Image (tube, helix red, strand yellow):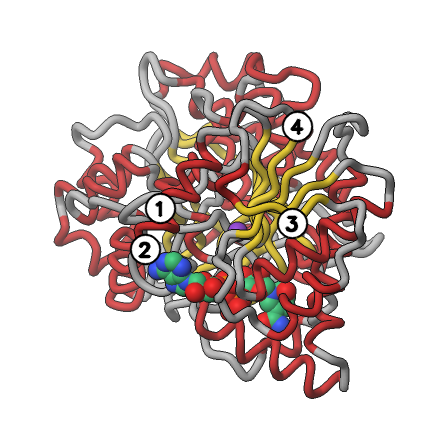
């Protein structure tokens, strides 16, 4: 998994890389520019559109000058707009790349920019070296870029956005941000979606091991990380190996939650799935899901189940006693979602009873019910971290770039998913997947990593053909394809 470092640590990471690899910092900047252009080439920008590159005097500007050179070499009409005065002192690598600009790149001062011109604007004014609030002249440059009518693409980070914290003033509003090496933390905050736009991660050749000497609680989960978290099964594996699980989901009028949850667990690979439901509703499960079984009360030893998932559609009335009963009689990690979380918010004394290592999956409103009103994402992450450490529990903050908050304080941002997953029942599908993985013998961390990533991937697969018409059942049907995509048997 890729560590997410702070803006301050970037300099040290880059310096260490340059030292160990025995390359010049200018070569690393060239790699960054090449990575940007390689992404550019994968897009279908109209080749006849002019490109305007705003360049600052630091290394972000240096990236911009190098990008301008490379795009001009491939036949684009490119202009650079210098965001500094005649007397400014440039970083050595920015100065070298300014010097290397070919004569067919127009070299202008930013005040000469016409915001009504057409084409694409590349923002290489300020990167992670921003300190404090934007100076007055920098604000004007940001405003000039935001007045542009065409597409804006930010290099590394939109200018004006701090790398690690919340935006307080102005910043460039990018349609796409191409960030180098790892996503800067602030690009993953929902508050900054308007500034970040689509997020593209560009590899500049720094290996995961080079991050090991830097301390950070934050990680970024990519497709290539997933396979290593999966267990493998063999040809003698039987349905017991794939887990017997119990899902307490659904109630009168909300049986769809139970169907989605159980079906999702079966599609994820569970060997046996039992739904704990009101007896009067049994026909719903038995006619829509012949592979599922039903239980109508909590009889027998609950430890006969390899995993238990609780919450979707159970209702909040009368559920507290049932949850307390399950917590007392079951010793392994449980998945808690939806109404189960609301019940915990109303009965905080139940928290101490939850088996260690259990997984809570609140959406933002449920998060506030459990942990109190939260103003912003950094505050939410801090609260989640304290909660997980205090209770030895894992918690998933759901949303775009859902955050897996582990009991040991690590916080892992997911990279898969799409806006088309914002649909009723998507959370029930995730509960089924997570419980299924626990039942297949995965640790809570493995279950979260595989479940959250594959849930997002199922959303991408379903959304490709169904767009905003995607429904939760489509996510369930796409789960098997996620195994194919990840080459997991
Ligand atoms: N070797 C490296 O360090 C690499 C750095 N890279 C790029 O370099 C960037 C970081 O470069 P730098 O550390 O030089 O910093 P930046 O280029 O991000 O910022 C420094 C500039 O910002 C100005 N500035 C700072 N605070 C300001 C404020 N409040 N208002 C107005 N202007 C302000 C400074 O005067 C200076 O001109 C990264 O974001 C990335 O784009 C990449 O080239 C990859 C390699
Ligand atoms: K920038």
Asked if the beta carbon under badge 2 is closer than 8 A to the nearest atom of ligand 1, the reply is yes
Considering the numbered disc 2 on the image, is that residue within a helix, a strand or a loop? Answer: loop
- Separation of residues labelled 3 and 2 (CA atoms): 64 Å
Q: Tags 1 and 4 in contact by the CB under 8 Å rule? A: no
Question: Which disc number belongs to residue 240?
Answer: 3
Task: Name the image quarter holding residue 30.
Answer: bottom right
Question: From mark 3 to mark 1, how far is it between C-alphas?
Answer: 63 Å
Q: Going 71% across and 87% down the picture, which residue do you hit?
A: 20
- Residue 129 location (% of width, % of height): 46, 66
Residue at coordinates 38% horizontally, 35% vertically from top-left?
A: 248
- Tell me, yes or no, whether the two marked residues, 3 and 4, touch with CB atoms within 8 Å: no
**To which residue does mark 4 refer?**
119
Tell me the element at label 1. helix
Is the residue under label 2 in contact with that under label 3 (CB below 8 Å)? no
Give x and y (percent) for residue 347.
13, 45
| Label 4 secondary element | loop
Q: Earlier in the sequence, mark 3 or mark 1?
A: 1
Q: Residues within 10 Å of mark 2 (few under 14, many from 20)?
A: few
């Amino acid at each position: 998994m890729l560590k997410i470092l702070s803006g301050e640590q970037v300099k040290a990471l880059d310096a260490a890389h340059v030292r160990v690899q025995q390359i010049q910092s200018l070569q690393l900047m060239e790699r960054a520019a090449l990575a940007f252009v390689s992404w550019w080439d994968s897009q279908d920008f109209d080749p006849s559109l002019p490109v305007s590159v705003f360049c600052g005097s630091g290394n972000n500007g240096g990236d911009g000058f190098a990008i301008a050179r490379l795009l001009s070499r491939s036949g684009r009409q490119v202009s650079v707009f210098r965001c500094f005065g005649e007397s400014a002192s440039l970083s050595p690598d920015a100065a070298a790349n300014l010097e290397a600009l070919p004569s067919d790149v127009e070299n202008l001062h930013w005040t000469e920019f016409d915001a009504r011109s057409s084409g694409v604007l590349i923002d290489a004014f300020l990167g992670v070296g921003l300190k404090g609030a934007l100076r007055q002249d920098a604000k004007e440059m940001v405003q000039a870029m935001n007045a542009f009518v065409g597409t804006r693409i930010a290099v590394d980070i939109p200018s004006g956005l701090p790398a690690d914290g919340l935006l307080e003033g102005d910043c460039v509003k990018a349609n796409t941000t191409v960030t180098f090496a790892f996503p800067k933390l602030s690009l993953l905050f929902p508050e900054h979606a308007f500034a970040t736009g689509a997020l593209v991660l560009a590899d500049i050749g720094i290996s995961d091991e080079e991050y090991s000497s830097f301390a950070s609680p934050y990680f970024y989960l990519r497709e290539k990380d997933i396979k290593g978290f999966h267990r493998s099964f063999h040809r003698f594996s039987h349905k017991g190996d794939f887990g017997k699980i119990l899902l307490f989901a659904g109630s009168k009028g909300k049986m769809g939650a139970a169907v989605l949850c159980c079906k999702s667990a079966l599609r994820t690979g569970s060997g046996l799935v039992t739904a704990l439901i009101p007896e009067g509703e049994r026909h719903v499960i038995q006619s829509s899901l012949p592979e599922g079984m039903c239980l109508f009360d909590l009889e027998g030893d609950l430890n006969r189940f390899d995993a238990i998932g609780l919450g979707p559609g159970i209702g909040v009335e009368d559920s507290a006693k049932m949850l307390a009963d399950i917590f007392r009689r079951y010793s392994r990690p449980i998945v808690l979602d939806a109404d189960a979380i609301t019940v915990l918010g109303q009965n905080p004394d139940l928290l101490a009873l939850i088996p260690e290592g259990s997984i809570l999956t609140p959406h933002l409103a449920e998060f506030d019910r459990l942990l109190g009103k939260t103003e912003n994402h950094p505050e939410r992450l801090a609260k989640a971290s304290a909660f997980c450490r205090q209770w030895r529990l894992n918690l998933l903050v759901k949303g775009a770039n859902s955050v897996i908050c582990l009991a040991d304080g690590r916080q892992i941002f997911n990279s898969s998913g799409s806006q088309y997953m914002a649909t009723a029942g998507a959370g029930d599908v995730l509960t089924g997947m997570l419980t299924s993985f626990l039942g297949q013998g995965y640790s809570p961390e493995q279950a979260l990593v595989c479940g959250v990533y594959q849930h997002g991937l199922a959303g991408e697969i379903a959304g490709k053909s169904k767009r905003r018409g995607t429904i939760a059942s489509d996510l369930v049907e796409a789960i098997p394809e996620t195994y194919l995509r990840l080459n997991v048997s």
